[in-house]
Image (cartoon, rainbow, N blue to C red):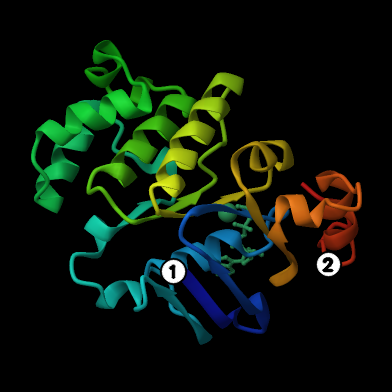
Amino acid sequence: MITIQNLTKRYGSFTAVDDITFTAPPGSVTGFLGPNGAGKSTTMRIAVGLTRPTSGSVHVLGANYRDLPNPAARVGVLLDASAQHSGRTGREVLTLGAMTLGTPQNRVDQVLEQVGLTAREANSRVGTYSLGMRQRLGVGHALLGNPEVLILDEPANGLDPQGIHWMRSLLRGFADAGGTVLLSSHLLHEVQMIADRIVMIGQGRIVADGAIDQLLSDGTDLETLFLTSTMSTSREGIAA
Ligand SMILES: Nc1ncnc2c1ncn2[C@@H]1O[C@H](COP(=O)(O)OP(=O)(O)OP(=O)(O)O)[C@@H](O)[C@H]1O
Ligand SMILES: [Mg+2]
């Protein structure tokens, strides 16, 4: 469970996140959707203790992330898939991750299999990876410690349709086993494929929140909802 309560983040006079409240419950995949600059990454960085909120709180599994014992083993995080060390192989990245977490090394092979990186790919340097392969590796890294919660910033960027399908089944399985998933995206179609709940944000404010079926029950499609909900708040007046 992730509980966000009256969260605000200001940079000087600019309000990046404006008094948002929502929860990502266990057993579901919550898509955090909004145009570029809406405040998604800022919210996720606050959730994992990398950015300080101006006011309000984010509780992950009932506490501030930083107050959880061994948080990385309970909360899997992918913030920037392109930030991985490019000189290491995928296997090395995961091996180091497992060592840091105190996770048995056989978990590395399990994770490689789970994210669909072949032995040849795992032994190649991350610098040679496509964006989709980096996303798979990043999700693998997040899964290493068998976490209860996944916080994934734009994990679907760069994935081909097969990759999206793979991510949907992976996250669906994770949620069905009782896990909590919060994933951000500015890509409507991908989110609709992967998530069962949606929290929509525009210019730092929540503009829609609920189960996808419920939000679209009157026949509205997600794109129309997104455009109409974020139009008035979008900086350029157009959604990403
Ligand atoms: N360290 C910072 N200093 C000043 N402004 C910041 C800082 N970090 C983020 N912002 C601003 O906060 C706003 C929200 O940024 P954020 O990265 O959270 O958006 P986002 O929803 O993740 O967008 P995207 O879809 O492009 O990833 C943007 O206007 C951004 O410029
Ligand atoms: Mg972002």
Find disc 2 in the rendering and name its residue: 233
Please identify the quarter of the rendering in which residue 6 is found. Answer: bottom right
Q: Is residue 211 left or right of residue 166?
A: right
Q: Secondary structure at mark 2?
A: loop
Q: State whether residue 88 appears in this view.
A: no
| Rendered location of residue 132, percent (x, y) | 48, 26
Find disc 1 in the rendering and name its residue: 47
**Which numbered disc flags the more N-terminal residue, 2 or 1?**
1
Q: Nearer the viewer, residue 179 or 113?
A: 179
**Relative to residue 53, is residue 78 depicted above or below?**
above
| Rendered location of residue 85, percent (x, y) | 29, 37
**Residue 150, numbered circle:** none
Q: Is residue 94 left or right of residue 35?
A: left
Q: Within 8 Å of ligand 1, the CB of disc 1? A: no
Q: State whether residue 192 appears in this view.
A: yes
Quarter of the image with the N terminus is bottom left
Q: Secondary structure at mark 1?
A: helix
Task: Assess whether mark 1 and mark 2 are in contact (beta carbons under 8 angstroms).
Answer: no
